[in-house]
Image: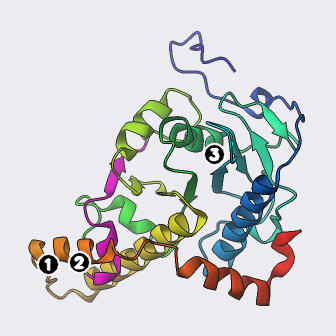
Amino acid sequence: MTTEATNTGQPRELTGDDFAAANAGSMTGAEWEARVDLAAMYRLSAHFGYDDTVWNHITMRVPGTDHDFFLNKFGLLYSEVTASNLIKVDSEGTVLEGPADVNTAGFVIHSAIHNDFPEHKVVFHAHVPDALAVTALADGFQHIVQDTSMLYGEIGYHDWEGLSLTLEERERLAANMAGNRMLVMRNHGFLAVGETAGEAFMVMHYFVRGCRALLAAHGSGLAINPGPTEIWELSKRQYDQFPLGKHEWPALKRLLDGIDPGYRQ
């Protein structure tokens, strides 16, 4: 994949034609389990209202690889994603398994994280409607309820650059994600990361809850008491004893198995 500038001197925007399909390789048991967990994330996102028709994307690094990752076939609703119809792509944009139907912005955003952060095996990008207004707040996100204290000190910001279609933006995305588990993409959306599907999903889940609380508090017109810094720091340390997703993820998959088991196909 080329990163050459256009004759205007601007970075070249990627298009669907940049993604060639190789369709080679076999699947291990660990890969299948990763596919199942990622498909579960898509279905649960649809269940909780974190999806946006065919847009946005969630990815998971392929077990045993450094930079390859699974993502959804562009054009599918989240409720249509299954373990078997996920696409496998490498860091250069070559589709290793599945059709070459790749969301270009999804590749740029997610490869930025998968290439630079081996600890972040799962990357979750969303434009959650009733939380999205926080991306436009001049002062950014503010912790005001306990539900987000596990993310205290772990929220970064990335300035809007339009649609994420150039490989050059990856460096800035990675720099702004460093040391964080949530990235507020200003005027755009949210990017959550985690070592597991459960961690990334719950980072998004609790952050969205915090956004809803913040917007409701602002909307009330009443004075906001954010709480003392030392208590936020204490609460953060307390929550560190309960790894995000460890207990929630098995319960969420049981929920999904009861209402929408088709994700396992």
Mark 1 neighbour density, 10 Å: few (under 14) some (14–19) many (20 or more): few
Q: Position of residue 156 (x, y in %)?
A: 33, 52
Q: Does 73 appear above or below 201?
A: above
From the image, state whether disc 3 or disc 2 is nearer to you: 2
- Disc 1 and disc 2: Cα gap in Å? 6 Å
Residue at 16% over, 79% down:
226
To which residue does mark 3 refer? 106
Q: Does 14 appear above or below 197?
A: above
Looking at the image, can residue 143 be seen? Answer: no
Disc 1 to disc 2: CB gap under 8 Å = yes
- In magenta, the rendered stretch is 145-160
Residue 54 relative to residue 205: left or right: right
To which residue does mark 1 refer? 231
To which residue does mark 2 refer? 235
Residue 126 relative to residue 157: left or right: right
From the image, state whether disc 3 or disc 1 is nearer to you: 1
